[in-house]
């Protein structure tokens, strides 16, 4: 998934170390299987890659009808749900726009107006239509990708597998996005949110050290299965003529996102939604996010945000779990 994934387990003597080791090993195989077989756009044999190839080779029809796997259908359902609730700030059809921008910047230029205008037909609300029985309609010549939600979905599936296998107390950590289960001998699990300016360090500091100045917030949970996902552009970007271009594309403008948010963290009991909303809120920006604080509390969505001017805030739901560092 383009990052380091770890699983930390704290169990009593009721389950042997060997059994725990075998179970965690199976969990890593499951992660690898989901990524390679379904979501990896760089694997020509993945389900997503096969769909995109068929879309690009289509002629004479507006939409292609696909029968997809249960897992991909569920991810498409969640993606469309989040897209509709965020005015399509979250959009899985971003891939063709991303490729245009990456190729242009790689060749020391910006995409021209003709390239941008041509893409508009293959982005946004009209690209994907869900039917029954795992069938979906996708607009031809579009490209879809799940990089804004796949990691969260895989983490959620891994969480369910570990629980069904008899493990109760563990953390799944995928590059700073975490899913927490149970407790540590009755004590809270704790995790931390990295400061945006800390991306230059070569080795990440200890996440649970409250004295460490590389973190701006600390979160804890016990027996709630909370998921925590962060979205930002301070680590992944392309620089051209002194300007940084985000890796996160806003398909509504067909441009890399220029957000007044430097980092957004979302807490939710479903990691798939936490991952997708983190991307969407980053794209929407602080003004729109701030308008939603009360409604997000009603949905059980926690948010912690750092603006470009370093101003920090969190809503009531996030405050149940987290606090800002001193």
Image (cartoon, helix red, strand yellow):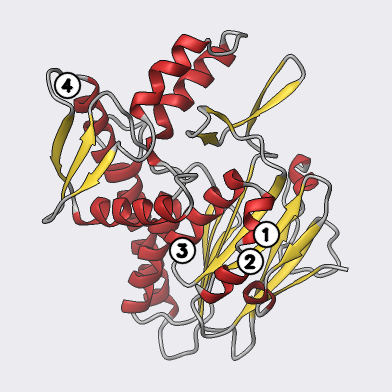
Q: Label 3: few (<14), some or many (≥20) within 10 Å? A: many
Q: How far apart are marks 4 and 1 (CA)?
A: 42 Å
Question: Residue 263 at what x, y percent from top left?
Answer: 69, 50
Mark 2 highlights which residue? 293
Question: Residue 50 at what x, y percent from top left?
Answer: 22, 32
Question: Residue 110 at what x, y percent from top left?
Answer: 59, 13
Q: Earlier in the sequence, mark 3 or mark 4?
A: 4
Q: Label 2: few (<14), some or many (≥20) within 10 Å? A: some
Question: Residue 273 at what x, y percent from top left?
Answer: 45, 61
Q: Earlier in the sequence, mark 4 or mark 1?
A: 4
Q: How far apart are marks 2 and 1 (CA)?
A: 5 Å
Mark 3 highlights which residue? 271
Q: Is mark 3 on a helix, strand or loop?
A: helix
Q: Do the residues labelled 3 and 4 touch (CB within 8 Å)?
A: no
Mark 4 highlights which residue? 58
Q: Do the residues labelled 2 and 1 touch (CB within 8 Å)?
A: yes
Q: Do the residues labelled 3 and 1 touch (CB within 8 Å)?
A: no
Mark 1 highlights which residue? 290
Number of numbered discs visible in the structure rendering: 4
- The residue positioned 40% from the left and 21% from the top of the image is 119
Q: Which of marks 2 and 4 is nearer the N terminus?
A: 4
Q: Is residue 253 left or right of residue 315?
A: left
């Amino acid at each position: 998934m383009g990052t380091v994934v770890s699983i930390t387990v704290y169990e009593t003597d009721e389950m042997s170390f060997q059994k725990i080791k075998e179970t965690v090993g199976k969990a890593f195989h499951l992660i690898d299987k989901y990524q390679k077989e379904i979501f990896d756009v760089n694997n020509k044999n993945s389900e997503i890659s096969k769909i995109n190839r068929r879309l690009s080779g289509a002629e004479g029809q507006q939409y292609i009808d696909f029968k997809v796997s249960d897992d991909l259908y569920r991810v498409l359902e969640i993606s469309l749900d989040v897209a509709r609730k965020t005015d399509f700030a979250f959009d899985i059809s971003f891939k063709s726009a991303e490729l245009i921008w990456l190729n242009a910047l790689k060749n020391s230029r910006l995409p021209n107006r003709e390239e941008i205008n041509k893409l508009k037909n293959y982005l946004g609300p009209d690209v994907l239509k869900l039917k029954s029985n795992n069938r979906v309609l996708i607009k031809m010549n579009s490209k879809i990708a799940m990089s804004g939600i796949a990691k969260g979905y895989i983490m959620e599936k891994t969480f369910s597998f570990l629980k069904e296998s008899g493990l109760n107390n563990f953390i799944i950590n995928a590059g700073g996005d975490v899913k927490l289960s149970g407790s540590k001998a009755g004590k809270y699990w704790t995790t931390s949110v990295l400061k945006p300016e800390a991306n230059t360090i070569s080795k990440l500091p200890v996440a649970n050290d409250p004295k460490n100045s590389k973190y701006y917030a600390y979160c804890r949970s016990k027996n709630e299965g909370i998921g925590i996902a962060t979205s930002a552009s301070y680590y992944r970007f392309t620089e051209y003529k002194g300007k940084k271009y985000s890796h996160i594309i806003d398909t509504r403008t067909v441009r890399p996102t220029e957000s007044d948010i430097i980092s957004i963290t979302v807490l939710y009991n479903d990691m798939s939604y936490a991952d997708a909303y983190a991307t969407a809120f980053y794209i929407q920006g602080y003004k729109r996010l701030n308008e939603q604080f009360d409604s997000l509390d009603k949905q059980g969505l926690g948010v912690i945000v750092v603006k470009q001017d370093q101003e920090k805030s969190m809503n009531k739901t996030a405050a149940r779990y987290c606090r800002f560092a001193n």
